[in-house]
Image (cartoon, grey):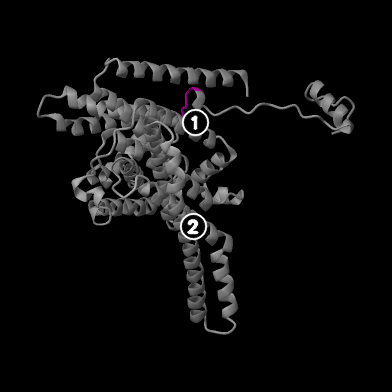
């Protein structure tokens, strides 16, 4: 890494620490009201979920309209865990956490078994073998039946593993948490709840995305929008399965655990992870899929695999942001996750600039401050006019700068690293010709024939 790049990274880290300390002092010393402190924290939460959508749409080129559904999964899953720790609505303080972890491990095991057995190729080989003995229709039906049986066995294995985890996890984790102070235990459960909710959102995104990844452009967007509508309808009636979620009445009793430190450093971590991933070989392969799928395939890139990685990663970040949101406001209602609200992250990443992490972060904070600032500035009774004013602002920006505020621009640490030039040692037999070519002026051969 060059000295300038190292200085840029160090300077960015110093700026992040200064911002954190300054805002922390303002909040702790009542320099700003609790309302505006909450707005600042909401800006961090919005930035996290928008970075996730920018990975899917801005960097990988998948037009997704269902991001709000994965945001809701992370919010409700993490809220169920922390609420269970305080109120024991499931019968034990770790019941919800062990159930979610069991579901996640069971799903991972089932998908792994299906992948190891190569069910798709096995089904194809079975059909080809059967065609020598039965008709094509019967061969297709029987091979599909074999694939379904194997998939059912894989699901059963995953369910068994999940059941074992659900049985033994509370007895292992519970005593460990009892040995530490209550505040430490509460923060540990909060962290585990956020990660569990994010992983669940990522897994659901992977499982939902796999059959949809064959769709392209608008068709993929409509399919993901359908998922968001399904999630909204499920949340409206969630109390029929889990009474403590309250369904259309809204979930209450969620501990208020999201603080400036939690949301800020999670935003920094998400930004660093995304930046490092995008500039890795896997990240560049993912971006190449956005540029031209046919060319990416010709270069040997597994397009479906990288689409699945991008979609699952974006959903993971959406679930993490949802968990922070749930513990920032201590209340969840299905209307917060209405599919119309799912257009907000899309507007933010387009406003900031598709494929720009800097633009996404700036636009996220700008979005939060403009909406709440208009609520304060406008006269009483005219607060709803902010939903007329901010679209006009967006139209003006899009007309003047259609590529977004930071389209194709990154600042500081987020800039693409420059590859260092390395000296290549020539073989002894080639040393003299290379030296001659390096020293002779163009057009002279120094007695060497070309």
Does residue 394 show up magenta in the picture? no
Residue 84 in view here:
yes
Image-quadrant location for residue 319 = top left
Q: Mark 1 packing: few (<14 Cα in 10 Å), some, or many (20+)?
A: some
Magenta part of the chain = 407-412
Depth order, front residue of 282/394: 282
Does residue 411 show up magenta in the picture? yes
Name the residue: 30% across, 45% down.
Answer: 88
Residue underneath mark 1:
272
Name the residue: 39% across, 44% down.
Answer: 197
Depth order, front residue of 20/386: 20
* Residue 9 x/y as whole percent: 53, 22
* Residue 379 x/y as whole percent: 11, 24
* Nearer to us: label 1 or label 2: 2
Residue underneath mark 2:
161
For label 1, the SS is helix
Q: Main secondary structure of the magenta part?
A: loop
* Residue 242 x/y as whole percent: 27, 53
Decide: is 79 above or below 140. above
Decide: is 92 above or below 437. below
442 sits to left or right of 141: right
Depth order, front residue of 50/41: 41
């Amino acid at each position: 890494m060059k000295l300038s790049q190292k200085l840029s990274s160090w300077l960015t880290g110093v700026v992040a620490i200064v911002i954190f300390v300054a805002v922390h002092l303002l909040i702790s010393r009542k320099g700003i009201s609790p309302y505006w402190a909450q707005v600042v924290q909401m800006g961090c939460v919005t930035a996290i979920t928008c970075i996730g959508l920018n990975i899917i749409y801005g960097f990988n080129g998948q037009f997704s309209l269902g991001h709000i559904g994965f945001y809701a999964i992370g919010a409700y899953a993490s809220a169920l865990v922390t609420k269970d720790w305080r109120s024991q609505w499931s019968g034990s303080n770790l019941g919800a956490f062990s159930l979610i972890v069991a579901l996640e491990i069971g799903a991972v095991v089932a998908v792994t078994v299906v992948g190891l057995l190569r069910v798709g190729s096995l089904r194809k080989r079975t059909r080809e073998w059967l065609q020598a003995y039965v008709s094509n229709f019967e061969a297709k039906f029987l091979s599909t039946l074999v694939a379904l049986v194997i998939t059912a066995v894989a699901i059963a294995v995953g369910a068994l593993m999940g059941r074992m985890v659900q049985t033994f996890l509370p007895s292992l984790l519970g005593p460990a948490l009892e040995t530490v102070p209550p505040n430490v235990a509460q923060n540990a459960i909060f962290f585990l709840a956020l990660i569990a909710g994010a992983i669940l959102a990522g897994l659901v995104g992977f499982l939902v995305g796999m059959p949809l990844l064959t769709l392209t452009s608008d068709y993929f967007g409509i399919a993901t929008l359908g998922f968001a509508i399904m999630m909204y309808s499920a949340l409206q009636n969630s109390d029929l399965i889990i009474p403590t979620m309250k369904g259309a009445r809204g979930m209450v009793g969620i501990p208020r655990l999201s603080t400036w430190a939690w949301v800020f450093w999670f935003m920094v971590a998400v930004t660093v992870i995304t930046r490092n991933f995008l500039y890795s070989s896997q990240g560049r392969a993912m971006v190449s899929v956005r540029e031209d799928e046919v060319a990416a395939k010709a270069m040997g890139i597994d397009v479906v695999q990288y689409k699945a990685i991008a979609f699952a990663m974006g959903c993971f970040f959406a679930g993490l942001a949802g968990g922070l949101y749930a513990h920032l406001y201590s209340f969840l209602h299905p209307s917060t996750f209405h599919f119309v609200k799912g257009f907000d992250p899309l507007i933010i990443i387009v406003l900031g600039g598709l494929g720009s992490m800097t633009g996404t972060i700036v636009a996220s904070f700008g979005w939060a401050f403009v909406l709440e600032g208009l609520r304060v500035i406008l006269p009483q009774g005219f607060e709803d006019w902010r939903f007329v004013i901010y679209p006009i602002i967006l139209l003006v920006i899009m007309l003047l700068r259609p590529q977004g505020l930071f389209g194709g621009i990154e600042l500081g640490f987020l800039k693409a690293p420059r590859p260092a030039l390395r000296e290549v040692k020539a073989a002894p037999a080639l040393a003299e010709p290379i030296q001659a070519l390096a020293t002779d002026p163009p057009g002279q051969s120094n007695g060497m024939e070309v």
